[in-house]
Amino acid sequence: MRKLAVGVLITLLVATIADFASAAYAEYRYSTALREASDLEFDPEITISGFPFVDQAAGDSYDQIGITARGADLGDGRRGDLRSKLSDVRRAYGEWVIGQNTELTADKATASLKIDSVNLGRFLGIIDLTVTTPAPEDKAGGGGPGDGILSTSTGVILTGTVNVSDPRNSGHSSAQRREKVSVAVDLSVRGGALHVDARNLYSGPAEHVESDVPSGAEPMVLAQFTKTLPVLPLPWSMPAVKAASQGSDVVLEAEPAPLAATAQDFWQGPSRSGRTLR
C-alpha cells in the first residue's frame, strides 16, 4: 500500500511538472509571437492562468491571459509599459500554441499604458521630473505597506526644475532663473490623450520641495507643468478613457471590453502607425 501511495504521488508530481512545463512553453511561444507581430523590442511577459493547463489547451480555452510589455517605444526616446488582461479566452481551432495568426476571443479585455516619472518628464520637457501620489488626508497611516499602491487623478504632486522669472525685474537679463518647484496637478483624458493640468504650487504634508517663486510668477511656472500629450497607443488599439497616478507613475486605461484579435493586433506603435509622437 505504501509503495502504491508513493507511486501515485510520483505520478502526480511528474504530471504537475509536465503541465507547468507545457504552460511555460506556451507562454514563451505567445510572447515571441507578440514581439514579432507588434512593434516591440523586447519579449513581453505572459501569464496563462488556470490549472491544469493541458486541459485548457485541449479545450481551446483559458481562464485568463496576462500580458506585460515593458519598455515599449513611444517615440523620441520615450518609453512606457503596456499591460493587458484577457478573461474567459477562447482560441480558434488549430495548434495548441498561440501563434501570430491565432485568433483569440475574450469576454473581457483590459488595456493600459504606464508612464514613469522620467518619461513623463520627457513629454513635459522637465528632465528631473518626479511624480508623487499623496496619501489620503483622512486615512491614518496612508501610504503604508497595508495600503498598497496609492492612486489618484487629482492633487498629484509633480516636482521638477523649470524657468522662473520675476515680473518685477522683467527688464533685466538676470530676471529668469532655474528653480525646482512642486506643483499639484489633475490628470484627465481628452480625446484619448493624457492631459496634465497644473492647479497650484504645492506646500502640503506630502514629500515636496520648498521653492522661492516670486509673486506673480506662479502662472508661468504652472504653464510649464500643463500639457496635453499626443494620443498614445494602448494594447489592442483600445482608446484611453481615464488617467491616474499610481505611486510614482502615471497610468492611462481603456474601458474593459470584449475582444477578438490576433497577435498582430496587440500594439500599433509609432513606426507601424506612421505617427511621430511629439
Image (tube, rainbow, N blue to C red):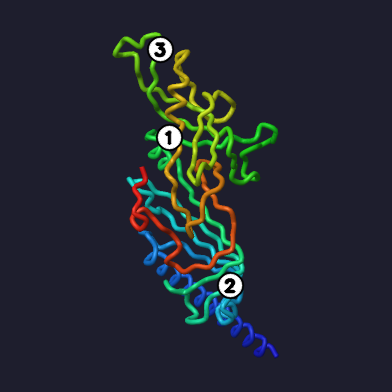
Q: What's the distance in space between the residues labelled 1 and 3, CA to CA?
A: 25 Å
Q: From this view, report whether residue 256 is shown above or below residue 242.
A: below
Q: Which residue is mark 3?
A: 167
Q: Residue at x 54, y 77 (%)?
A: 17
Measuring from the top left, give residue 139's x and y in whole percent. Answer: 69, 36
- Name the amino acid type tagged 2: Tyr
Q: Residue at x 68, y 88 (%)?
A: 2
Circle 2 — which element? strand
Quadrant assignment for the N terminus: bottom right
Q: Which residue is mark 1?
A: 129
Q: What's the distance in space between the residues labelled 1 and 2, CA to CA?
A: 41 Å
Quadrant assignment for the C terminus: top left
Q: Earlier in the sequence, mark 1 or mark 2?
A: 2
Measuring from the top left, give residue 18's x and y in whole percent. Answer: 53, 80
Q: Please state if 220 lies on the left or on the right of 1 as rendered.
A: left
Measuring from the top left, give residue 116's x and y in whole percent. Answer: 45, 44
- Name the amino acid type tagged 1: Leu
Name the disc covering residue 62, or none. Answer: 2
- Mark 2 burial class by Cα count in 10 Å: few <14, some 14-19, many 20+: many
Camera-near label (1 vs 2) is 2
Q: How many labels sit on residues?
A: 3
